[in-house]
Amino acid sequence: MDEVAGAIADPVRREILLMLRDEPRSAGQIAERFAISRPAVSRHLRVLRSAGLVADAADGRRRVYTLVTAPIDELAGWLARLTAPAGWQHRLDALETEVHRTRRERQNAARHIRSEKESA
């Protein structure tokens, strides 16, 4: 997970991943999108490959890269746990709902009693 987080920390690498989400691309196609040198793009691809986020295959003289999303699942799970409400938060939310429901029922009962007195 640490290697994946480190790999996606760089904005160029995140952009590469977004490019590969749509379709596999050659290293040359990827490099064309950036105002950095091809060796720099190659280094970014190496980091992504090392983290398991991309796979590459030879296609003649060029390398074609594809997105691999499995390593992101562990990180996504951890982030979901981080942003999920704590155990007590669920209980407090349920208590708040119950308080509002009880308050509403009491107000409705009081209105009903008032209307009965007025009609009598």
Image: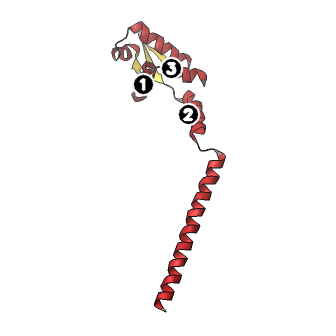
Q: From what the image shows, is residue 6 above or below residue 72? A: above
1 or 2: tag closer to the N-terminus: 1
Q: Position of residue 14 (x, y in %)?
A: 45, 23
Question: Which mark is on residue 76?
Answer: 2
Residue holding disc 1: 20
2 or 3: tag closer to the N-terminus: 3
Viewer-proximal residue among 39 and 59: 39
Q: Quadrant of the N terminus?
A: top right
Question: Element at badge 2?
Answer: helix
Q: Nearer the viewer, mark 3 or mark 1?
A: 1
Color encoding of the figure: secondary structure
Question: Element at badge 3?
Answer: strand
Question: Which mark is on residue 100?
Answer: none
- Tag 3 and tag 1, C-beta contact below 8 Å: no
* Residue type highlighted by circle 1: Leu
- Rendered residue at 44%/21% (across/down): 11
- Rendered residue at 50%/13% (across/down): 46
Q: Nearer the viewer, mark 1 or mark 2?
A: 2
Q: CA distance from mark 2 to mark 3?
A: 20 Å
Occupied quadrant, residue 28? top left
Q: CA distance from mark 3 to mark 1?
A: 10 Å
* Residue type highlighted by circle 2: Ala
Residue holding disc 3: 55
